[in-house]
Image (cartoon, helix red, strand yellow):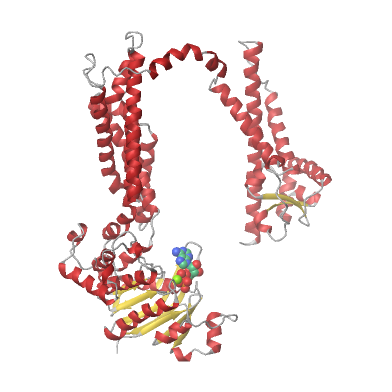
Amino acid sequence: MADQLVVEHLTKIYERGDILALDDISFSVVKGEFLVVIGLSGSGKSTLLRCINRLIEPTQGKVYFDGVDVTAASGGELRRLRRKMGMIYQQFNLVKRSSVLTNVLAGRLGYVNPWMSAVHRFPREDIEMGLKNLERVGISDQAYTRADNLSGGQQQRVGIARALMQEPELLMADEPVSALDPATSHSVMKYLEQMNQEDGVTVITSLHFLSLARRYGTRILALKDGKIVFEGLPSEIDEARFKEIYGEEAEHVEVR
Amino acid sequence: MSKSVEEMQALRFRVFAFFLDWASWGYIAYGIMYLLNSYWYTNIHYYGRLSVPTWGWPIVILGTLELAAISHAFGHSIGLSMFGLRLVTDSFTPPSLGKRWQRYLAWHVAVLSFPVAIWFSTQKSRLLHDRLTGTRMVLVKQYKDEIPILPPRAWYKTNRGEMSVVLIGVTLWVGALVTQIDLHTMISRVSTSSYLWKELLSPHFTHFITPDPALQQSIVSGMIETIFMALLATAVGAAFALPLSFLGARNIMGFSPLGWVVFTVVRGVFNVVRSIQPLLWGTVFAVWVGFGMFAGVMALGFHTVAALGKLYSEQVEGIDPGPLEAIAATGARRWQVVLYGVVPQVIPSFLAFTLYRWDINVRMATVIALVGGGGLGRIMFYYQSRVGLLPDAWNQVGAVIMTIIVVVWVLDYISGRVREKII
Ligand SMILES: Nc1ncnc2c1ncn2[C@@H]1O[C@H](COP(=O)(O)OP(=O)(O)O)[C@@H](O)[C@H]1O
Ligand SMILES: [Mg+2]
């Protein structure tokens, strides 16, 4: 099968602090994969995900999505590419004072008539789609409450619904469960798994815990100091590899 | 940082610290000369001026230089503490008094022989008097591990504490003389002014509703004018400030060089317009559109754009960037990101600031009457100009002032309640 996402020699240097956050990263992702990126904090996971949809501008290297060069796209073309890549975040990144439904509808901004969005009008189909997606993540009864009245797990589900509105082909998640407790973590991860298996959406997620990565990932990419130190199947990570990725003093932590 | 960069930084800071201390002593010397001078001509010879002879200036300059050197050798001066410098021995302990004397004397040798000293320090990267006495002036942050942490001393026991007291004391004393503060007159003439207080505090509300024939206006109608003037100035000001504030926010405009230019220009204009009093803008607009209420509204509105614009911009800069990132990632346009990500976050504080500004504008509208505007201000200044002509002029002024107080108080109360509700 053809690669859906190709990353070639991606390098990011933060000028402030002169930090080499990504160092010549190359990998590709096949459609339908569930790729998990692991690594210590500061290893470059967030930077990598954000360079793919250019929330952060890469210093060097190329990103191709469905054969289109994302790094060369600008203006309208970049926006159309971003539309196809949903993203969810560690801190949920909802507009706290807006209603849940408004937050979800923001996922349609790349599609709707801009003039209508200027006066906060969305097509009927989009509103129905929003309610349907909220139902799918199990919080349709909260559609009109303010986002900050929801619990952490519920807010992350709003984030997922917002990403679903984009009808994405690729879903990127930056440590989506790091701010949640273990039980809620699994319920959120299950939604990602469902999107991956039922809708055939490719998922790239960074995760803090190896146990979660093993449980959900079909493939694992490990970063250390901005370099890829491991790429392969979850089962291939043995004690030696684990120590290499997480350092000598690391202990296994299970998230059940 | 490499060793040599660190050493250069320490050296630079030493120079800064020294000049800062020298300047503080110079300031004190100048202040004392001012005080002496003023004492001379008030108490000794009215027409005389105490002047420093030409040979006096070098003495002052050298004297302050010595004082700065002393405060560097013997204590922890303002300059040293400001730049985080500390005098220590080679083993990083505080030097003894004897060492400090040595250092003070060696400093003279180093200064007097400065070509040699410079050569010496480029060879050994330490200044001559450092080496001669086995002491060093170090940046505390560069030697955190070596320098023992001493128990802090009470501020009035430290060198910089005492120095600061002297600096503040001299400044206030000279300031009192410059501004001619005169408590004696103020107290001795309390009784003379008491009639004014009596009349102001027994206001005559004769023209509260019935218009004054000379003015053709009542206090109530003036009040309505003032409130509307402030309301319009606030509304117009806010309407312009709203879009401009996004252009003046670093986090919105920082995406391109052009954005930076716009940001800098907008914020610059805000700051300039804001720093010019509405009263001055009133003068400008009185010339432009003619003396009257219109000029007053324009002046207030103009100032409001800048004042609110700055406050709004700062609110925009203080928002949570997470939602913006998320909305941009959905493929939204920049302005959609602003509309859906920024606006909901800033609306409550924008409203609160706007109401607060209305309050300010009511108060300013009364002063603007001096150069234009009507309303309560015009009535107040009219009665005040009739003192001596009208028997109850001060009582009338009192009535207007009472009205202003009540209006401001009511508006303040309302805006406070509204603010509570929306935040
Ligand atoms: N905006 C930024 N400016 C400067 N340095 C940054 C910025 N964001 C991240 N970094 C640095 O880049 C490196 C990688 O960070 P990040 O991608 O956030 O790692 P992770 O998500 O794995 O914790 C870290 O050293 C971090 O300090
Ligand atoms: Mg991260």
Residue A216 in sight in this render: yes
Question: Quick one: which residue is furthest to the right in this view?
Answer: B98
Residue A112, horizontal then vertical, whole percent: 19, 66
Image label count: 0
Query: x and y percent of residue B44 in the render?
Result: 66, 11
Q: Is residue B371 visible?
A: no
Report the residue at 29% width, 19% height from top.
Answer: B205
Quadrant of residue B369 within the rendered picture: top left
Which corner quadrant of the image does residue B188 belong to?
A: top right
Q: Is residue A163 left or right of residue A239?
A: left
Residue sitting at 29 percent across and 22 percent down?
Answer: B378
Q: Picture coordinates of residue B57 (x, y %)?
A: 67, 26
In the rendered image of this protein, does residue B383 appear above or below residue B131? above
Residue B30 x, y percent position in the rendering: 63, 27
Judged from this view, the residue extending furthest toward the bottom is: A235
The residue nearer to you, when weighing B54 against A197, is: A197
Q: Is residue A235 left or right of residue A54?
A: right
**Is residue A124 left or right of B381 when viewed as pictured?**
left
Q: Nearer the viewer, residue B229 or A110?
A: B229
Quadrant of the image where one finds ligand 2: bottom left
- Extreme residue toward the left, this view: A124
Q: Residue at x 56, y 82 (%)?
A: A251
Q: Quadrant location of the N terminus of chain A?
A: bottom left
Vertical side of B269 occupied by B371: above or below: above
